[in-house]
Image (spheres, grey):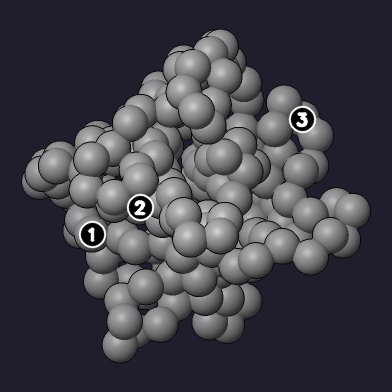
Amino acid sequence: MYRFASSVVIGMTAVFALGLAAAQTPQPPPKVALQQATGGIDAIMAYAGTWMVQGERFATAYSDAGKEDSTLRNDCWKSGAYVACNQYVNGTSKVLLVFTYHDKEQMYTSYPIPLNGEVVSPGRLQIIGNVWTFPWAVTHGETTVYFHVVNVFTSADHIDYAQEFSVDNVHWTTMAKGSETRTGQ
């Protein structure tokens, strides 16, 4: 699990990167998001660059309370139908993410490659306008808990994020929320 944004590592580890309320209606997308929505794999390049992350984590059954202040750098490049991003948190490389895009499903798949070579399951990403949602579920026995990270691009250089969990995939509890501001390429 990783979050692409303040979260591929944190959100996608708990970082692109955290879930907004499930009932949120996407705002009209900024101009850059409109271009991304039609760009297939090229959309991922919107997350390239350096971002200042400021957020808050809440005490829940699946998270501890605390603050999140970090610098996230996504060193991304495109080769053919793939985008890869070496994700750095506070100057340290944490994970290499390789993204693919399935046009018929309009869904992205991310393949995290951690430094230690540990086997990690692929993740999913759905982009609708300016809202990027990273969903996943964890099943233990007969119980499934749903999680998602939602990044809302309010501009090309600003993201509001939230991470949430749900036991019914309808009612969501916020685990963390915050913002990311691009400070450079």
Which amino acid does the dot numbered 3 rest on? Gly
Q: Position of residue 130 (x, y in %)?
A: 24, 49
Write the residue at 44% across / 70% down: 108
Which amino acid does the dot numbered 2 rest on? Thr
Q: Residues within 10 Å of mark 2 (few under 14, many from 20)?
A: many
Q: Secondary structure under badge 3?
A: loop
Q: Is residue 41 visible?
A: no
34 is higher (above) or lower (below) than 47: below
Question: Which residue position holds label 1?
Answer: 128
- The answer to which of 36 and 110 lies nearer the viewer is 110
Write the residue at 29% across / 52% down: 169
**Distance between the alpha carbons at the discs numbered 3 and 2:** 26 Å
Q: Is residue 164 visible?
A: yes
Q: Secondary structure under badge 1?
A: strand
Q: Position of residue 136 (x, y in %)?
A: 46, 57
Question: Which residue position holds label 3?
Answer: 91
Q: Is residue 32 left or right of residue 177?
A: left
Write the residue at 62% across / 21% down: 70
Q: Position of residue 39 (x, y in %)?
A: 33, 71
- The answer to which of 24 and 92 lies nearer the viewer is 24
Q: Residues within 10 Å of mark 1 (few under 14, many from 20)?
A: some
85 is higher (above) or lower (below) than 176: below
Residue 113: quarter of image: bottom right
Question: Which residue position holds label 2?
Answer: 133
Q: Are marks 2 and 1 in contact (CB under 8 Å)?
A: yes
Mark 2 or 1, nearer chain start = 1
Q: Secondary structure under badge 2?
A: strand
Can you tell which of label 3 and label 1 is closer to the viewer?
1
Q: Is residue 168 left or right of residue 142?
A: left
Mark 3 or 2, nearer chain start = 3
Write the residue at 35% across / 46% down: 167
